Amino acid sequence: MFMNKTFLAALFLPLILIPTAFSSDSPNIIVIYTDDQGFGDAGCLNEKAKFKTPNLDRLASEGIAFTNAHSSDTVCTPSRYGLLTGRYSWRTSLKSGVYTAERPCLIADGRVTLASLLRDRGYDTAMVGKWHLGMDFPGTSHKNRDWTQPVLDMPLDKGFDYFYGIPASLNYGILAWFEGRYAKVPPTLFTNKKPNQRHVDYRIMPPYEKTPEETKKIVGRPGMEVAPDFVDNICLTRFTDKAIEWISGKKDSEKPFFVYLPYTSPHYPVCPLPEFHGQGECGGYGEFVIETDYHVGRILKFLEQAGIDDDTMIIFSSDNGPENSWKQRIPDFSHDSRGGFTGGKRDIYEGGHRVPFFVRWPKGIKNPGRRWDGLVGQVDVLATVAEITGAKLADSAGEDSQSFASVLYSENPEHERLPLINHGAKGRLSLTDGNWKLIAPHGKLKWELYDLSKDIKEENNVYAANPDLAEKLTQKLTDIVRQGRTTAGAPQPNDTGYWKDLTWMTEEEYSR
C-alpha cells in the first residue's frame, strides 16, 4: 500500500493501493500544465534562476527539453483550447481575452480532444485541476442556483471519464471543489480579492460573507460565489492528491490512462504553503514555483513506487509567459521569468508564448537528456499522441497539429515544423517559419519582421529591408488563416467569418 503524505494535516487522504503496470502497447500519458510560468522559471532553462526546480530539471535530464516550444496563445483560455484540440483558438468565436467561469464551453460538442482521442483508443481519462474553458452551471446567478442539479457542457462532455477541479482562474468566482458534475460543498458564500502579504496580487481565503453586498462593504468589490471550504493555497495539494488517487484506482485495469493536470500556479494568487516560505531567493513567487516543482516530484515518486514509471509519458508545459510582476522581480531579485526574451503574458513577442516544455518517457525516448531547439507548438501534442497510439486524425480534427513523435524516437530526427502561428491577448497574430518571425499589423501597430537566429530579443525590425520575404510569409499567414488549417488535408471552415484583427486582408479576400 501507498500512503500519500501532504503538508496539510487537515487534508486526510486514505491509504491508496498501488496499481500494477498496465498491459498495453500505448504509454500512460500525463500532461502537467502550469499557469503563467515563464521560460526563465525552470532552473534547467535559466542558469541565473533564483530558485531551484529539481523535478522539472529531472524531466529535462531524463527526457527532452524543447527550447523553442510555444503556447498557441498568450493567455489562459485560448492556450488550453489549442493544447486540447490541436486547433488555434482564434478560429473560434474567441478572438481576444479569456473566458469567465460561466459560459458555454469553447470546445464544441463533437470536437476531437486529447481526452476523446485517447478514450476512443481504449484509455481511461481524467482531468484534475483548472478548466477555464466554460461550463454551464445550474441557474443563471447566485439568486437562482440549484446545486443539486448537474453542471453541463464541461470536461465530462469533452472526452474525460473523471473530473475534479475548479471552473476557472480564482478571480472569476464560482469557486468550489467540483467532482464529476457536482460541487462537493456548494458555493453558497461570497468573497473577493483580499490583500496578499507575500506578493503584489491578492488572496482568496476565509472569512467569507453571506451576500455579495456584504462583501462589497468589506473589500470594496461585489462578492463572487465561493464554497465555505475553499481556500486558494491548497489547490496544488488537492489536485496532486486527486490525480494520484485516481491513478491508484486503476490498479485492476489493463487499460492505459491519460491524466490532464492543469495546476493553478504560479498564476495569481501567489500563495505558497507556509512550509515553502523562505525557500529560494525570489520572494513569494519563487516559493510558489518551488512548491509547484515539489508536486511534480510527488507525481514522479508515485509513478516509481507504483511500478509504472517506465511506460508513462509526462508532458510538462505552461499556458503562456509570466504575469506582469516579472518586471519587478528583475530589480528586486535579479530573476528574469521571461528567460531573457521580450514581453510576457499577453504579448505577441517571444516572452509571451515561448514556454518551458519537457517530455519524459523512459521506455520511449531515444537518448534522453537531449535538448531540441527546433520549433514546436502545444497544438502539436494532439497529433503526436495520435501517432504514438496509432490513431488517425480526421480532416476535421487537429487542423493545426503536426506530430513531433520523430523527435522522441530518433537522436537525429528530420522534423521541420510547418509555419507556427501565435496570438496575442488583444488579437494580434504572428507567424514563425524557421528562424523568421512575422508579426501582423494590428490597430495602429505596423508589420514587424525578425530573424530570431540573430535577434532573439526582437529588437531589430527588418521588415522594410526584406520585402520579398515579407510578402512570402504574409501569403503563408493568409493561407493558414483562410484554409482553416495548417496541416495537409481538406480545407476546413473557421467558426466565424472575417474579423477585425485580419487587417492585412479585406473581407472579400478572406471569403475567396
Image (tube, rainbow, N blue to C red):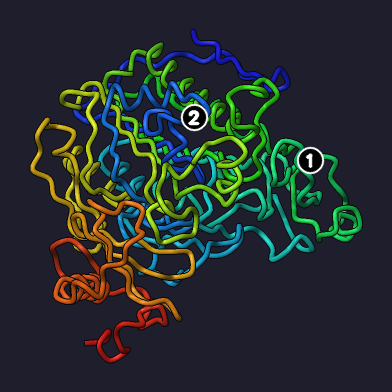
Q: Nearer the viewer, residue 437 or 300?
A: 437
Q: CA distance from mark 2 to mark 1?
A: 23 Å
N-terminal of the two: label 2 or label 1? 1
**Quadrant of the rendering where the C terminus is positioned:** bottom left
Residue type, label 1: Pro
Circle 2 is placed at which residue position? 243
Label 2 element class:
helix
Residue in the image at 20% along x and 54% along y: 393
Label 1 element class:
loop
Crowdedness of circle 2 by 10 Å Cα count: few (<14), some, many (20+)? many
Residue 253 badge:
none
Quick check: 461 above or below 224? Answer: below
Q: Nearer the viewer, residue 301 or 433?
A: 433
Q: Nearer the viewer, residue 145 or 370?
A: 370
**Residue 446 placement (x, y as % from top left):** 37, 77
Q: Spot the residue most to the top.
A: 1
Residue in the image at 31% along x and 89% along y: 506
Circle 1 is placed at which residue position? 228
Quick check: 497 above or below 334? Answer: below
Crowdedness of circle 1 by 10 Å Cα count: few (<14), some, many (20+)? some
Residue in the image at 72% along x and 39% along y: 230
Q: Is residue 108 visible?
A: yes
**Residue 151 placement (x, y as % from top left):** 59, 53
**Residue 327 placement (x, y as % from top left):** 57, 48
Residue in the image at 51% along x and 53% along y: 154
Residue type, label 2: Ala
Q: Is residue 238 visible?
A: no
Seen in the image, is 366 located left or right of residue 310?
left
Where residue 91 sits, quadrant-wise, is bottom left
Where residue 206 sits, quadrant-wise, is top right
